[in-house]
Image (spheres, grey):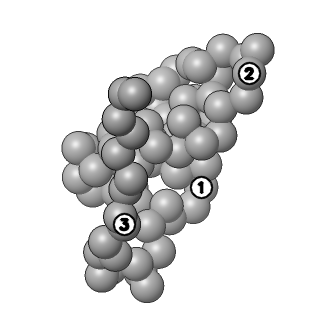
Amino acid sequence: MRSDLIFGALTHVTNRYELCQLASKATRKLHKPNTRLQDTTNEVLDRFKDTVPMGESEAVVEKVHVQERRAA
């Protein structure tokens, strides 16, 4: 069940909001066309359960410049 995956992922990411943000970003990057989004989300949470998504070396937040898209 997904709740088991979430509680497993919370062992490495203590903040639920941060877990949600990381999971949504990872799901967007790992999602393959013609597959269910739910399966990709479960896979991401399973990976978070097994590994630390934010390594200890990433304690310092890096600023990422995001280019905004504007309608023509």
31 sits to left or right of 33: left
Q: Which amino acid does label 2 sit on?
A: Pro
Number of the label disc, if any, that sits on residue 40: none
16 sits to left or right of 34: left
Say whether disc 3 or disc 2 marks the residue closer to the N-terminus.
Answer: 2
Residue displayed at 59% across by 55% down: 50
Q: Mark 2 points at which residue?
A: 33
Q: In this view, does 68 lie above or below 3?
A: below
Residue displayed at 37% across by 56% down: 66
| Secondary-structure class at tag 1 | helix
* Contact between labelled residues 3 and 1, with CB atoms less than 8 Å apart: no
Say whether disc 2 or disc 1 marks the residue closer to the N-terminus.
Answer: 2
Number of the label disc, if any, that sits on residue 50: 1
Task: Give the CA separation, mark 2 to mark 1.
Answer: 25 Å
Q: Name the residue under label 3.
A: 64
Quadrant for the C terminus in the image: top left
| Few, some or many residues within 10 Å of mark 2 (<14, 14–19, 20+) | few
Q: Which amino acid does label 1 sit on?
A: Asp
User: Residue 47 location, x and y as percent?
Assistant: 61, 49
User: Residue 28 location, x and y as percent?
Assistant: 54, 36
Q: In this view, does 35 lie above or below 4?
A: above
